[in-house]
Amino acid sequence: MIAALLLLAAAALIGWLLWRSWIRPLLDLRDLIRALADDEANTPIVRSSLRPFTQISADLGRIADRQRRQRRQLADEGFSLRAILGSMIEGVMIVDPSQRIRLANDALYAMFDLTRSPINRGVREVFPHPELASAIERSLREVRTVILEMRDEPRIGDTRVERHFRIHLSPLAPVGGSTPAGVLGVFNDVTEVRTLESVRREFVANVSHEFRTPLAIIKGYVETLLDGALDDRAMAVRSLEVIQKHGDRLNLLIDDLLTVSRMEHRAPDMKYCLVSLPQILDRVLEQLDSTIRARQASVELALDVEHIEVDPPRIEQVFFNLLANALKYGDAGVQLRISARQRGEEIEIAFADDGPGIPYQDQPHIFERFYRVHKDRSRDAGGTGLGLSIVKHVVMAHGGHVSVRSTPGAGATFKIALPARHRSG
């Protein structure tokens, strides 16, 4: 009986020693390895004084420290990458060799109005532009940067707006490898640049056309004079009158072009002073007096504002252009009404007539350079097509804005809103 008890006690002691020396440390090692595998912040301690276990525990502790440092480094790098990508105005996209999108920044979402995440979706699914997928494939295949110009027409409300993008596609090749791991795409919105280029081309074409007509007429009459018309006094006088008329038109066109150019660049020679609005209008009406009488027009003034702070010659040109237009295109006996009132921090000056009005389709364009509602009639009347463009730019240079409201067949009203006080600087 005593022997059996002694054997049981010895077995228990041996079991306890095995548990303490080997089994518990092995279980601690298991928990420690699981914690490292699960990337847990707190790692268990191996409870053993045996050298193999303490060495393994120390090595695993160093691995845990290294993992923590790497996590911090990755977090810092991730934050820096997100900050950089988030602050870029260029759209950025990374695709893998199968052309699945792996990364896209906020600018790309905004550029293409992406309401659904493009991550892990195919390029052809997100962008309905076959040329983009083809360019990515070429960059991957030839391991070189490919530059692509792409046009897009996103829908904004009920209309589509044309936009232009310049895209740089660069292969992402691993260090020491030859097969690209993907492609980095950088999207630049060049819509404004392309629009300006189009405006420049249109402007050059319009100027060339406007100069060509009077020059061709002058050249024709000079040839007529050289061919013998000098001996016919009546024909010679008529030819010289036509030459003078179109020479004056060229001078007027050049003056208007220079005015528009100065106003577009916000010329620094604006000289503001407080002037009498009735006096400025009186000077303009005096200049147009012969035209007013010839057109049998009537002009009514309803001015609730006495003084305005403007650049007098510039604003006088605005008033002249608006009144001259109303007289030029109005019927005989046209009635004009000029009113002025202060509305808050602005002074509103309206020029209303009972003329033929402006077609609805022309109203959004009438302040554009060289735009004419009645093209043949405008040229016959000696217009340059720049009068209303000058009005717009002069008013904008004053810090104001101009608008038109017209019903075809029922006249038109041009409204100018100017700051009640000019703030220098």
Image (tube, helix red, strand yellow):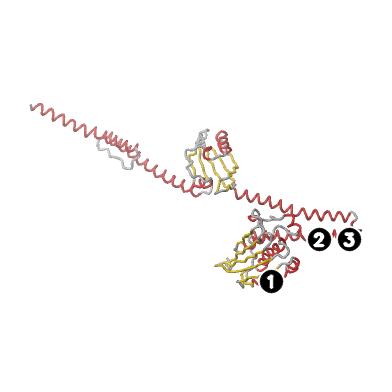
Q: Position of residue 319 (x, y in %)?
A: 67, 66
Which label number is shown at residue 299? none
Q: Amino acid at mark 3?
A: Ala
Nearest to N terminus: mark 1 or mark 2: 2
Q: Nearer the viewer, mark 2 or mark 3?
A: 3
The residue labelled by disc 1 is 282
Amino acid beneath label 2: Gln
In the rendered image, residue 223, in percent from the top left (x then y), is placed at 86, 54
> At label 1, which amino acid type do we have?
Asp
Q: Please tell me how crowded label 1 is: few (under 14), some (14-19), or many (20+) other residues with Cα within 10 Å.
A: few
Mark in the foreground, 1 or 2: 1
Choose between 336 and 255: the one closer to the eye.
336
Q: Which badge, 3 or 1, is on the more N-terminal residue?
A: 3
Structural distance between the alpha carbons of marks 2 and 3: 15 Å
- Residue matched to label 2: 244
Label placed on residue 234: 3
Q: Is residue 323 above or below residue 109?
A: below
Q: Are marks 1 and 2 in contact (CB under 8 Å)?
A: no
Whether 81 is drawn above or below 98: the answer is below
Answer with the quarter of the image where residue 39 lies: top left
